[in-house]
Amino acid sequence: MESLSAPWRIQYILAPKPAASAEADGSIFAQIARSSEDEANYVIARDRTCFAVLNRYPYNGGHLMVVPYKQTPDLHGLTEDEMGDLMKLLRRCQAALTTVMKPDGFNIGINVGRAAGAGIEQHLHIHIVPRWSGDTNFMPVLANTAVLPEALADVAAKLRAALTL
């Protein structure tokens, strides 16, 4: 059997994981929201009440998230204006992904609560995952590995450029 490797995953595996009760500074999204290190954090756009960030450990190339600055576990914690801003940025990001990556479709969704698959359950975020016909193959199923054809920094730079048009 041939060995497969995904060396970028080791950073996530070995990184310290804060206990939920020890997150005095808020979620990772709250920390990114306060940071000015947009390139290092793969932030591709900032709007009035929300921002967009590439997933550091993506399911597919171009997998990004639209996140409100306000930390809330679900949609009920957002105002109507914040909801509108979130949807507008989601639409802009989908358009940028379409221009830059030319996917055949998208998975767009929100996981609310741990039982629904929320990895950062205290801070609502919307996933946008570009999909291509035939992109589901044996790699994720047998090797628990995704093959990303382009570096995150390169994807981030292209999406930032597309979002400033």
Image: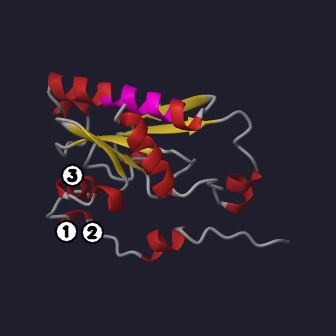
The dot on residue 22 is 1
Neighbourhood count class around disc 1 (C-alpha, 10 Å): few under 14, some 14–19, many 20 upward: few
Q: Which residue is mark 2?
A: 19
Q: How many marks?
A: 3
The dot on residue 33 is 3
- x then y, percent, for residue 27: 24, 57
In this view, the residue in front, 156 or 128, is: 156
Neighbourhood count class around disc 2 (C-alpha, 10 Å): few under 14, some 14–19, many 20 upward: few
Instruction: Determine contact: label 1, label 2, CB under 8 Å.
Output: yes
- x then y, percent, for residue 158: 47, 44
Q: Amino acid at mark 2?
A: Ala
Q: Amino acid at mark 1?
A: Ala
Single out the residue that lies furthest toward the right.
1
- x then y, percent, for residue 104: 63, 29
State the separation of the CA atoms marked 3 and 2: 20 Å
Q: Is residue 10 above or below residue 127?
A: below
State the separation of the CA atoms marked 3 and 1: 19 Å
Q: Residue at x 37, y 54 (%)?
A: 42
Residue 72 shown left or right of residue 61 in the figure: left
Q: Amino acid at mark 3?
A: Ala
Q: Secondary structure at mark 2?
A: loop
Q: Which quarter of the rendered picture does the C terminus lie within?
A: top left
- x then y, percent, for residue 71: 19, 46
Q: Is residue 161 above or below residue 35?
A: above
Of the two numbered discs 3 and 2 on the same chain, state the one appearing first in sequence: 2
> Which span of residues is magenta-colored?
89-98
Neighbourhood count class around disc 3 (C-alpha, 10 Å): few under 14, some 14–19, many 20 upward: many
Specify the quadrant of the image occupied by residue 46. Answer: top left
The dot on residue 120 is none
Q: Residue at x 37, y 49 (%)?
A: 114
